[in-house]
Image (cartoon, rainbow, N blue to C red):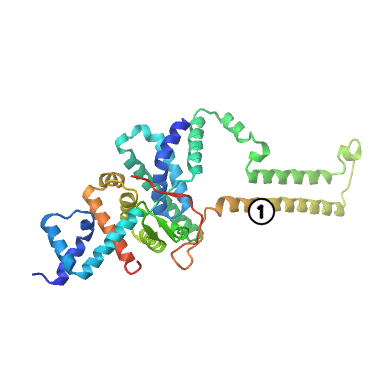
């Protein structure tokens, strides 16, 4: 007769196959006889059965609807893309006007426009300021140059503020939502709303 | 086309999403994986034997999950951020009902999900596909490209690992 320790080891190696009804004949008989007489192995078997049962009760999760909708858009877009020329793509890209342009492009355009306006306004010898042909020699004072510079700095500061705000919006909407917070202390994460849980019938 | 795609999506999206969630424990990444797999499914559905389609889908899903894990590791290295592991246990009420009406305690489910998230591959995949999603051994073997007997042995090892993790907690 084998020592209890060795028999328990033999039993523990076969607990999972037993739970799955994969033991037969003499092996099955030997297993069940030992379980009847060994409390420790019987407890282990009970735990194994509970784990198997609870695993099968873990839920399926419903995929949010927007996932398949976005996939459908991608599939549709890929199908359309195959038949388009570069001109079609360019037209489509800017079909929404300035709102469809990338934010950096808009910001850069604004900077150029504002700087151009400021420089133009600082040029007093242009026809719309003088009412006619530019005068011959015209001097720009230090004060006028200083004012033009300050106006340009102010314009750039406004544009910079817009860019920063746009960056914050981008970060909040597109990036922060995707980056996850680090684990804090326990391995259990904070509560989050979750989609409807449903159970599939095999 | 849209109707055909919708039908295909309805049949597989929950299965893909559920697997991705249990593997990644991140809703956003699971959504990304699901979308990616649905697109690939649409692109290749005519090339796959209908009898093996489910296994094929799960194989593609697993590869997408592996890619997502790699991207997560790269992001962690670049941004030095941690990844928050979501569990459903925190949002499940104190008790919920399984298919047979038994009351499943929040603590057991929480402990089990945490334990499942801690066991390594391919044991975790096999447990999810076989025990939670009810795929046959043959389907699991095809999805993970493992022989049938290996799937059985690994499943038992995976459950034993879970048992070790749960000992004393339930």
Query: In screen coordinates, is A66 left or right of B7?
Result: right
Q: Is residue B111 above or below residue B133?
A: below
Quadrant of res B16 = top left
Q: Quadrant of the N terminus of chain A?
A: bottom left
Query: In screen coordinates, is A16 left or right of B15?
Result: left
Q: Is residue A73 above or below residue A61?
A: above
Q: Residue at x 87, y 38 (%)?
A: A128
Mark 1 — residue?
A164
Closest to the observer, B109 or B12: B109
Closest to the observer, A63 or A158: A63
Q: Residue at x 10, y 58 (%)?
A: A26
Quadrant of res B156 = bottom left
Q: Residue at x 60, y 50 (%)?
A: A170
| Secondary structure beneath label 1 | helix
In this orientation, does residue A135 appear?
Answer: no
Closest to the observer, A94 or A41: A41
Q: Residue A40 at what x, y percent from top left? A: 22, 70
Query: In screen coordinates, is A193 left or right of A111?
Result: left
Q: Residue at x 31, y 60 (%)?
A: A51
């Amino acid at each position: 007769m084998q020592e209890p320790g060795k028999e328990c080891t033999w039993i523990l190696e076969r607990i999972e196959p037993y739970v799955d009804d994969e033991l037969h004949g003499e092996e099955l008989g030997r297993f069940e006889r030992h379980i009847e007489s060994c409390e420790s192995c019987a407890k282990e078997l009970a735990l194994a059965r509970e784990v198997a049962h609870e695993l099968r009760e873990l839920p399926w999760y419903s995929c949010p609807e927007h996932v398949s909708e976005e996939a459908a858009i991608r599939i549709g877009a890929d199908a359309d893309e195959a038949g388009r020329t570069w001109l079609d793509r360019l037209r489509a890209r800017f079909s929404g006007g300035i709102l469809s342009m990338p934010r950096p492009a808009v910001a850069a355009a604004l900077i150029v426009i504002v700087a151009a306006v400021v420089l133009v306004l600082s040029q007093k010898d242009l026809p719309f300021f003088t009412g006619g042909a530019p005068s011959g020699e015209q001097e720009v004072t230090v004060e006028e140059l200083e004012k033009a510079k300050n106006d340009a700095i102010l314009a750039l500061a406004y544009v910079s503020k817009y860019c920063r705000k746009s960056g914050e919006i981008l970060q909040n909407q597109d990036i922060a939502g995707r980056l996850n917070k680090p684990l804090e202390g326990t391995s259990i994460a904070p509560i989050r709303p979750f989609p409807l849980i449903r159970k599939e019938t095999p | 086309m849209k109707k055909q795609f919708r039908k295909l999506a309805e049949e597989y999206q929950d299965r893909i999403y559920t697997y991705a969630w249990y593997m990644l424990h991140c809703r956003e990444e699971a959504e990304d994986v699901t979308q990616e797999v649905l697109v690939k499914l649409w692109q290749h559905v005519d090339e796959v034997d209908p009898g093996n389609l489910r296994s094929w889908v799960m194989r593609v899903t697993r590869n997408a999950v592996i890619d997502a894990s790699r991207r997560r590791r790269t992001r962690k290295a670049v941004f030095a951020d941690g990844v928050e592991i979501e569990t459903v246990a925190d949002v499940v009420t104190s008790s919920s009902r399984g298919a047979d009406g038994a009351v499943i305690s929040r603590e057991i489910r929480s402990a089990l999900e945490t334990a499942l998230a801690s066991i390594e591959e391919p044991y975790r995949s096999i447990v999810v596909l076989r025990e939670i999603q009810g795929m046959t051994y043959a389907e699991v073997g095809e999805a993970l490209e493992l022989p049938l007997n290996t799937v059985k042995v690994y499943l038992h090892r995976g459950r034993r690992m879970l048992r070790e993790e749960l000992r004393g907690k339930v």
